[in-house]
Amino acid sequence: MIDVLSRDGRIVSACAAQEAVLGLVPGAAAGEAWSAIYPLASRKRLEGVFTETTVGPHVVTLEMRASDGARIGVTAIVTRFTDPEQGLCLRTVKWPAGGALGEVATLAEEKEILESILAASDDAGWCMEWDEPVDLSAPEQEIIRQVFENGPHWRFCNDAMARLYRTPEGKNFNALPVHETFPRSPENEDFVRRLIRASFDVNASPSRDLRYDGVFIEVENDVRGHIRGNFLYRMWGTVRDVSKHARRAAVLREEIDTLEAILDALPESVLVVDRDARILRINTSAEELLDLNPDLLPARSIDDLIELPVPLTEIFAVAGDHLPGHPSGLYPVLLRNPDRPIRAELAARCVALRETDCLVLSLRARLGPVSQGGDLASLTSLRARGQ
């Protein structure tokens, strides 16, 4: 069954076999509106072919309406063409629904639905294939070479992918070379190496890609691979631009490095402890003063190193009541140095680290010998100094 349909909604011609199936007299269909033989849903499907990016052939499922009102399911191969007199038209070649052609139409419709979902997504989606499949039985470095050199090309990329990489106006991202946005570089070789070791099944794997405006961007990829017989035929996934986060992370790392350098350069000894008396952080001056190996820090408590005049809970309470702009009170303490005890003064301030209450302790050694009675007296005099 064959007919020709014009874009203005008219039937240009219909073959005798089609008219016979529909119960029409020969020549009755020509000049009629589409609605004479196609229900609304089928008309909408045919109208959609006029807007397809390719002329076809397109395999679609349709219904036709017979003269007695009966519906006849058909599978149609539709091609768009330009008629010298009628202008843009569709030629439909139809068979009764069912059989292998019906399965093709179902698959074509499912493909169209999936492509529509991907095209409408704001997530950049892609699928890459190779002219020659990648041999995954080869050594790792050879697999990496093949990924970049075995003729990689885009099988499908959505509009979000084209926007992400700043595709030039009028260019089809799917037709552009892969290496223009995914060049072979040390970063991208590492990316492929991670894919190999994860059997091409990864989430949030970083790579460094090149946009068409010449700017490198840091991206994260969720990737899956189609492997058959130890050969990689294609891989696909989604990609996210994390350049802003990467830049922010780099700034934060630089700030952290600066603060750590300042902390370690302080002439005063500084420790950070939590309410359980665990030492969380210590600077270089404190390591030297307490003769403490930083590798043993997780196993040490402040009570192992410093003899406090009052319980740590009381120091927490006093530090918590400290008024900004007022000097901190000093606690006379005794450092339990392995060679000899050392007298020192301790100041404390509260700080919240990851929602955990902590104390920042500053220690300053005091000159002079330690006498047991004198130091006990100085510890007892603590409260007389406003503590």
Image (tube, helix red, strand yellow):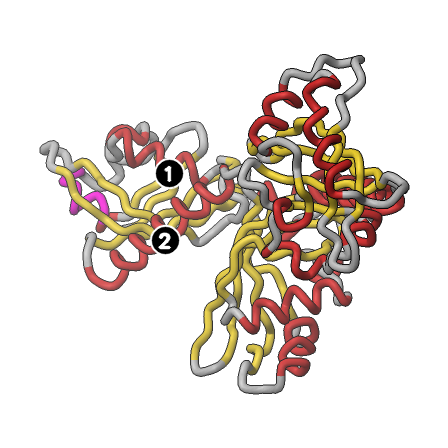
Residue drawn at x 82%, y 54% as measured from the top left? 288
Q: Residue 361 at what x, y percent from top left?
A: 73, 35
The residue wearing badge 2 is: 108
Check the image and name the residue furthest to the front.
373
Q: What element carries label 1?
A: helix
Residue 66 coordinates in the image, percent (x, y): 15, 37
Rendered residue at 43%/35% (across/down): 6
Quarter of the image where one finds residue 209:
bottom right
How many dots with numbers?
2
**Could you say which is closer to the camera, residue 276 or residue 97?**
276
Left or right of residue 244: residue 117: left
Q: Is the magenta stretch mostly helix, strand or loop?
A: helix
Amino acid type, label 2: Ala
Q: In this orientation, which residue lies closer to the viewer: 227 or 285? A: 285
**Mark positioned earlier in the residue sequence (1 or 2):** 1
**Disc 1 residue type?**
Leu
Which segment did they paint magenta? 18-24
Of 267 and 213, nearer the camera is 267
Crowding at dot 2, Cα within 10 Å, few <14 / some 14-19 / many 20+, comes out as: some
Q: Name the residue under label 1.
A: 46
Location of residue 383 (image quadrant): top right
Q: Residue furthest bottom?
A: 138
| Residue 370: image location, x then y, percent | 81, 44
Towards the viewer: 204 or 296? 296
Residue 166 visible to an observer of this rendering: no
Specify whether 196 is left or right of 344: left
Using the numbered discs, state the Cα–Cα distance from disc 1 to disc 2 in whole angstroms. Answer: 14 Å
Q: Where is residue 77 in the image (x, y as percent from the top left)?
A: 36, 52
Camera-near label (1 vs 2) is 2
Q: Which mark is residue 179?
A: none
Q: What element carries label 2?
A: helix
